[in-house]
Amino acid sequence: MQFKTRNLIGVCALGLGLPLSAQAEPEFPRVSMWTAYDTGSTYYIQASALGGLLKEHAGSNIRIIPGRNDIARMTPLKSGQADYTMSGIAAYFAQEGVMLFNSQKWGPQPLRVVAANFGNQAIGLAAAGDADIETPADLEGKKIVYVLGGDAMNMTTAAVLAYGGLTWDDVRKVEVGSPLEAIDAVLDGTADAMPGSTGNPLIERLTTSPRGHAWVQLPNETPKQQEKWEQVQEVAPFYRSITATEGNAVSEEEPWYSGGYALPIMATMANQEADEVYALVKFLNEHYDQLNRQAPSAEGWNLESQDFTWIMPYHEGVIRYFEEQGVWTDEYQKHQDELIRRQEVLSEAWQQYMASIGSNDFQPVTWSEQRLTALEDAGLAPGLR
């Protein structure tokens, strides 16, 4: 088995190797290319820790290409320059051809999950303690942060608003350029609430400020609350109910009933070689304890934490490993088949739309309409709009 080795300028070389399958014992690339967030980010540190383990135990290497934004991280994967990515929820946006990927250069992408870090981190809205905000319904008329270019954060806010039967039209939008500007806006009274998480150290600035801090609560226990969560997932299908008891400003005595999603998502393209992906996920699980000790917020990478009925399909090499472990069921395979059918419907709709327009006639609004029509005609949920 032959693999090409790429030489890149300005990337960080780290160790990554792939274990040998007990049956096939395939060879593995001397060098693999990955993308991740910038140096120093949790995603980068997790990739680095995994790389160190793989170099130690398998003698192979990765090179991590740091990307400052979602497009920068996904472009090398799309072009074939990179083999894997440590992505945020942008991987789902790319699958759907929405947000930043609603452009002539992108459209829906055939991505597959290798593993998803479903950890304990909750993500939702953090409010100033003096703003009288406890539930999503209390957000009506309040000043809410909108992060320019922060699609994932803004979709989380939209999901919280949906729990309260609200939309962005029901609040006063406060536009900021970054998470740092977001916390400053809440601290100085420009805004009343912002996207936040139990893993975000910036929240500590709010908890110790004169304004104080309150998490916006989204309980999911009673039938009425579960109906509200159905409203949430119509807006943001990737957002799952979580009760947080660990992290910033939460405890067993004062939990945060919120939501969250996998961070990061280890993803690749559908055509990535199955033997290699199988070996990678096998290695990840066999060395999970070491990884969890060495990297922050890595508790959700193991097999037990995976969500087999989430919003992106697993790679066929991963499913082979799941089958070996006896955890893959007919129900999960049916869900997997529907996710792949969804990608096929989106791909066909994209090809038809692109064939119908001139080289300079792409319109994001028109593609969005075509996308929704194709999904509805196929009997599939529209998901993100």
Image: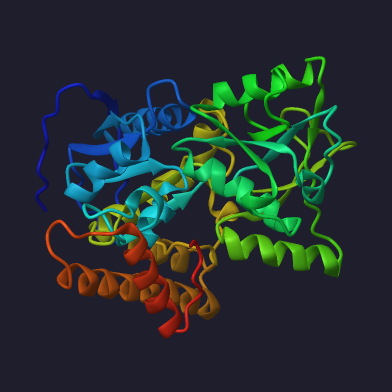
Q: Residue at x 36, y 61 (%)?
A: 365
- Residue 78 in picture, x, y percent from top left: 23, 50
Residue at x-position 38% and y-position 65%: 368
Q: Depth check: 141 or 316 in front?
A: 141
The image quarter in which residue 202 lies = top right
In this view, 258 is above or below 290: below
Residue at the far right: name it: 253
- The answer to whether 291 appears left or right of 120 in the picture is left
Q: Residue at x 82, y 15 (%)?
A: 210
**Left or right, 20 with reference to 381:** left
* Of residues 104 and 306, the one drawn nearer to the viewer in this rendering: 104
Q: Is 283 above or below relative to 253?
A: below
Closest to the observer: 322 or 148? 148
Q: Quadrant of residue 375?
A: bottom left
Instruction: Identify the coloring.
Output: rainbow
Name the foreground residue: 213 vs 385: 385
As drawn, 200 above or below 90: above
Residue 197 is at least partly visible in this image: no
**What percent of the width, then of the height, locates residue 194?**
66, 34
> x, y percentage for residue 305?
59, 52
Q: For residue 55, which quarter of the picture?
A: top left
So how many labels did they put on this image? 0
Residue 362 is at least partly visible in this image: yes
